[in-house]
Amino acid sequence: MNTTFWFKSSYSHESGDACIEVCQPKSSQHAEKFEDSRPHIRIRDSKNPALHPLTIPAPSWAAFVAALRTS
């Protein structure tokens, strides 16, 4: 069973150009974990979802989003 969900940025235009999609696990139990054992998320280009996604630690993504919201 697929436990992940890709979603587009809320700033995405109807045409779908220049967008990213983010994949977060539905629960921490199903989160991807790497050597540092922290949960990770995946980010991909919505125009070419077949390309390998960028995988980053979830806390780093949260800090990035928080910084965008304050600027």
Image (spheres, rainbow, N blue to C red):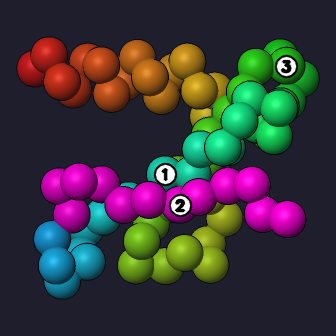
Most extreme residue toward the right is 35
Residue type pointed to by label 1: Val
Residue 64, by quadrant, is: top left
Horizontal placement of 34 versus 26: left or right?
A: right
Question: Which quadrant is the C terminus positioned in?
Answer: top left
Observer-side mark, 2 or 3, equals: 2
Residue 52, by quadrant, is: bottom right
Q: Is residue 13 above or below residue 5?
A: below
Provide residue 22's location: percent of width, then percent of height: 49, 51
Q: Residue at x 54, y 75 (%)?
A: 49
Q: Which residue is mark 2?
A: 6
Provide residue 53's location: percent of width, then percent of height: 61, 58
Q: Tag 2, which secondary structure?
A: strand
Mark 1 or mark 2, which has the lower sequence index?
Answer: 2
Provide residue 65's location: percent of width, then percent of height: 33, 27
Q: Which residue is mark 3?
A: 37
Frontmost residue, 67 versus 4:
4
Residues at marks 2 and 3 touching, judged by CB atoms closer than 8 Å: no
Q: Is residue 69 above or below residue 3?
A: above
Frontmost residue, 25 versus 58:
25
Crowd class of label 3 (few under 14; some 14 to 19; many from 20; radius 10 Å):
few
Q: Which residue is mark 1?
A: 22
Provide residue 34's location: percent of width, then percent of height: 85, 30
The magenta segment is 1-12
Q: Residue at x 17, y 55 (%)?
A: 11
What's the CA distance linking mark 1 and mark 2?
5 Å
Residues at marks 1 and 2 touching, judged by CB atoms closer than 8 Å: yes
